[in-house]
Each structure stands twice: as structure tokens, then as C-alpha cells.
Amino acid sequence: MPKHTFHPELRGARFVPRATPIGLARRLGGLAKPKPPRGGDLVRIDADVSVRVFRPPSADGPLPALLWVHGGGYVLGSATMSDAWCREVTSRLGVLTAAVEYRLAPQHPFPIPLQDCYTALQWLSAESEVDEERIAIGGESAGGGLAAALALLAKERGAIRPVLQVLSYPMLDDRTADRTDIDPASLRLWSQKNNRWAWNAYLGLQASDPPPLAAPGRYVDLAGAAPAWVGVGTSDLFHDENLAYVERLRRAGVPCELQVVPGAYHGFDLIERKASVSLAYQESQMAALERALGAEPPEQQR
């Protein structure tokens, strides 16, 4: 498919902006007051970190669980963005889901957001209702980048071993921001300018020499990381860095499923949720979670 041709089912592509107005989005996001999610609970872990938790209505024994990390370029967004997806996972698979509210750059650059995510993972693993041997992690965009870094941090520390990392068009490699061969007309929602600003904000004083855990695309030894599901569209700024990461995971012996969607732009499944290509993309994630977690859908638990 030519790179300027969007998927025919993504009819909204012509209306989606090429870039995100980060300043405006940050101001609007700052006005939101956190509220408990519909059908779930807002749990405060410590003074800095909270999670939005969804539990199946009835289940026997310790539950498999998913920790989800929201996107927003490390500088935007909140865990409320993940409510619909977390409710769907809990409803469909009968697992406990928790979306972490991590602190955002530039006020809180690396490693603070990653540390917040690890705090949430430790909390989830220690919960009596959770089977610590069946925990998956995942996220979209920058949340996918944090989930990838979290998988590597868990590998380094060895205390918690996620069974799967779900990386939806993850933001993995700051070096993409330096590329000059990308036509902005082929992008939607997240531009090179957005990418450059966000990486500088997240890396802060370490921008000239990023630590590998800050940009997982730079991480050298991927062996021993959790198995992965990675999805991205061909019209996504992160397409090339995502495919490169998948290739490196596979070379390191990490099982990795790749879902490439022709003509899909960044965040397509969130913007055009009801398009059949978006539903198929999310079904692929759901199937990967069901296999990895050994989940029993609620109708099978009765």
C-alpha cells in the first residue's frame, strides 16, 4: 500500500490532525479531577501513584491480571483514557485490570514515570486476589514505551516476571525524532515536532545520552524479556522503530507476535473504535492476553 494511502475503513483519517497541540492538551488535562471509574475503584498506592482497578463480578481463586499504561507522549493524558479498554478486558476475559496514573514529564522526567509504573506493578503482584504468576503488562504509544521499559526493568530486578507485554504502537526510540526522511503528510495525530518535544521533555538533562531504560529501542540485551505482542500501522511515525524492536526481540529469543495494519495511523483504534480494522486489531490483543494469562472468560467460570 502506498504510504500516503490510508486504510479504506479508516474514513476519519482525512479529519484527524497531523499533530497534537501539546500545550492546549496539557492545559485541558490539568482541569480534570480524578474520579472513581464506572464499574471500578480508584486505589491510592502512595502519595504519588494511583491505579484505576476493574474486577470481574465473581471469580474463584487468585485472578490473572493486566497492568495497563496510558499513552500521551510521556507528557499528556491520564489513566481515565484506559477505562473502556480495561472494562472490556475484565468483562471479556474475567481478569483483574489496573490502569496506572503515573506522573508526567517535563515536571517529572525519566526515571520517575517508569518508577511509578513499577510501583503499580509491585502493588498488583502483592494483591491477595491476584495470581502473581499470571500478570501481563501493556500500553499504547508512550504507555507502550513504558510497558516495554517495565518489562526490561522487571527482567533486571527478577522479582516479578510478566507473562506478556502488549505494546500498541509503542514510543520506543528517541532517535526517530532526528529523522529527516519522513513526509508529514503521511502522519496523523503525532508529528515529528511532537515527538522531538516529548522526548526532550521526558529525557530532560539526559537527552544527549539517554539511559537504555528511558528509550527501550537503545537497550542492548533484550534476552529474557517477557514475550511480546506488538502492533502498529504503516502510516504511524513509530512504524520503523517498532519493527526494528520486534526484530531485535526475536533475535534475542523473545517470542514476539507482530500485527502490522496497512494504512493505519497513530491511535487509529482509539479514534475510530468501531471500524472493523480497529476491532480486529483489538481482538488480536485480546486473544494474545487470553492465551498468555490462561484466562477463563466469565461464562466459563460459572
Image: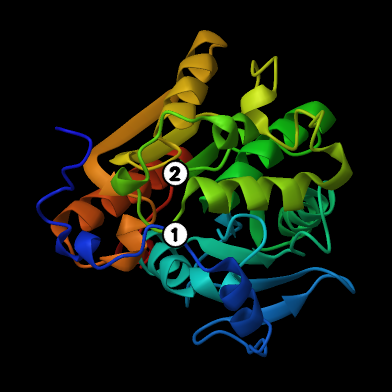
Q: Can you tell which mark lies on residue 144?
A: none
Q: Quadrant of the C terminus?
A: bottom left
Front-most of residues 275 and 288: 275
Per the image, label 2 sits on a secondary structure element best described as loop
Per the image, label 1 sits on a secondary structure element best described as loop
Q: Are marks 2 and 1 in contact (CB under 8 Å)?
A: no
Q: Measuring 62% from the left and 45% from the top, which residue is drawn there?
A: 196
Q: Measuring 53% from the left and 19% from the top, which residue is drawn there?
A: 249
Would residue 38 be found to the left or right of residue 197 on screen?
left
For the question of whether residue 133 can be seen, the reply is no
Picture coordinates of residue 137 (x, y %)? 58, 47
Front-most of residues 291 and 226: 226
The residue carrying pointer 2 sits among few (fewer than 14), some (14 to 19) or many (20 or more) residues within 10 Å by Cα, namely: many
Picture coordinates of residue 130 (x, y %)? 65, 57
Residue type marked 2: Tyr
Name the residue tied to disc 1: 19
When asked about the image quadrant of residue 214, the answer is: top right
Q: Can you tell which mark lies on residue 169?
A: 2
